[in-house]
Image (tube, rainbow, N blue to C red):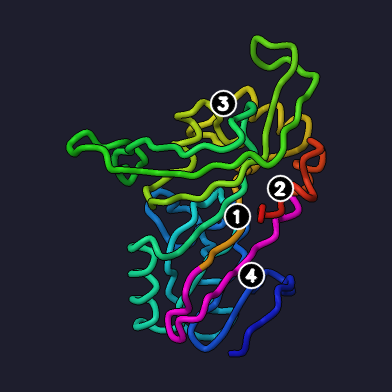
Amino acid sequence: MSPTPAGVCPDRALEILYADEALVAVMKPSGLLVHRTELASAATEFAVQRLRDQIGRPVYPAHRLDRATSGVLLFALDPAVHARLCAAFEAGAVRKRYLAIVRGWPPASLVIDYPLRRLDGDGTARRDAAPLAAHTQMLSLATAELAVRVDRYPTSRYALVALTPRTGRRHQLRRHLKHIDHPIIGDTTYGQGRHNRLFRERFGCTRLLLHAAALTLAHPLSGAPLAIVAPAPRDFESVAAALGIGAAGFEEPA
């Protein structure tokens, strides 16, 4: 396959962000599982299955995104390339950039250095081993304030942030944002229900406001630098626009 420009595919097909003879990257919508899991046994739709059927050949996911997270999802087209990609992710050679809308106004920039325990299949933190090192770089892009009392203050503050995980622990970004008391809006596990309800009622937002915006890596065959970008989806962008923190706030600083 030759490189494919970004564009929304018809019907229920996944939007292809990039494709060549070795790789395919798609835009995973919020709510779609990457692959089958016992925790969502009733689900019948999976990114692996949909992409396989869409392009007519086996695909091998190189990493994971939570079901509720949207954004760049990268697949290999054969097992050898898949092994190389997995090794690159494991070695931290793939740069990942996320966008999130969080409660409160966090610092302009911050490195969150907070070890995390492994999670069991049901999401429970394991107590039989020491926590593992976990690091996330956060940059505040824009802030907003609503004249609505949710907590003890007369107004409620929110921010659009860029997140770059330096390690790959499960639910790392969501757990780290909870740790610094700036949970991601729409997070029903680590977030705050009162703020999630406000966004449902005021903006019709029923998703986790976390988006995998970009992957940067060396191509597993040529070694050439490759940057794959997923623009913020409409449901994410509409909330940001309603808060007045969209548009330029999505751009990555120089």
Would residue 133 be found to the left or right of residue 226 on screen? left
- Amino acid identity at mark 2: Phe
Q: How many residues crowd mark 1 within 10 Å: few (<14), some (14–19), many (20+)? A: many
In the rendered image, which residue does mark 3 sit on? Answer: 192
Residue 48 visible somewhere in the drawing: no
Secondary structure at badge 1 equals strand
Task: Tell me the number on the disc at residue 236.
Answer: 2
In the rendered image, which residue does mark 4 sit on? Answer: 14
- Picture coordinates of residue 223, whole percent (x, y): 45, 81
User: Are the two marked residues, 4 and 3, in contact with CB atoms closer than 8 angstroms?
Assistant: no
- Amino acid identity at mark 1: Ser
Magenta region: which residues?
Answer: 217-235
Q: How many residues crowd mark 3 within 10 Å: few (<14), some (14–19), many (20+)? A: some
Can residue 110 be found in the magenta stretch? no
The tag earlier along the polypeptide, 3 or 2, is 3
Front of the two marks 4 and 3:
3
* Residue, far left: 128
Q: How many residues crowd mark 4 within 10 Å: few (<14), some (14–19), many (20+)? A: some
- The quarter of the displayed image where residue 60 is located: bottom left
Would residue 116 be found to the left or right of residue 173 on screen? left
In the rendered image, which residue does mark 1 sit on? Answer: 70
Would residue 127 be found to the left or right of residue 236 on screen? left
The tag earlier along the polypeptide, 2 or 1, is 1
Residue 201 visible somewhere in the drawing: yes
* Residue, far front: 254
- Amino acid identity at mark 3: Gln
Q: CA distance from mark 2 to mark 4?
A: 17 Å
